[in-house]
């Protein structure tokens, strides 16, 4: 009984690692998924949605980049201001 349980655990671990990439069922499922993906991409409504999502993502990335550049400028200005005020106070 204990030997069987150990063997089952071993089998599950081995299956999880390899996922039987070359198995017939896996090949069939991959082919079906690819066909479904191509069919979705051919649909004009789906294409419009994808384009809109990508446009929104690009805008958000650009906005985030602008905010980061602005924050860096502020940090640089603050560090310069802090350095000059220390020098003025010591004189």
Image (tube, helix red, strand yellow):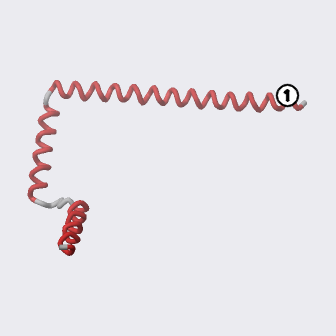
**Residue 76 coordinates in the image, percent (x, y):** 66, 31
Quadrant of the rendered structure where residue 26 is? bottom left
Q: Residue furthest front?
A: 1
Residue at 15%, 25% (x, y): give it.
44
**Residue 28 coordinates in the image, percent (x, y):** 9, 52
Residue at 17%, 33% (x, y): give it.
41
Q: Quadrant of the N terminus?
A: bottom left
Looking at the image, residue 14 lies above or below residue 85: below
Residue at 16%, 39% (x, y): give it.
37
10 Å neighbourhood of mark 1: few (<14), some, or many (≥20)?
few
Q: Residue furthest right?
A: 91
Relative side of 36 to 57, left or right = left
Relative side of 91 to 13, left or right = right
Q: Quadrant of the C terminus?
A: top right
Residue at 77%, 32% (x, y): give it.
83
Looking at the image, residue 91 lies above or below residue 27: above
Quadrant of the rendered structure where residue 71 is? top right
Residue underneath mark 1: 88
Relative side of 63 to 18, left or right = right
**Residue 7 coordinates in the image, percent (x, y):** 20, 71
Quadrant of the rendered structure where residue 62 is? top left
> How many numbered circles are shown?
1
**Residue 59 coordinates in the image, percent (x, y):** 39, 25
Looking at the image, residue 81 lies above or below residue 16: above
User: For numbered disc 1, what is the local secondary structure?
Assistant: helix
């Amino acid at each position: 009984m204990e030997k069987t349980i150990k063997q089952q655990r071993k089998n599950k671990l081995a299956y999880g690692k390899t996922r039987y990439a070359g198995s017939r069922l896996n090949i069939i499922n991959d082919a079906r998924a690819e066909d479904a993906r191509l069919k979705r991409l051919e649909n004009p409504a789906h294409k419009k949605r994808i384009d809109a999502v990508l446009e929104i993502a690009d805008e958000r990335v650009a906005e985030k980049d602008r905010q980061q550049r602005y924050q860096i400028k502020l940090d640089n200005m603050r560090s310069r201001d802090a350095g000059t005020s220390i020098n003025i106070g010591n004189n």
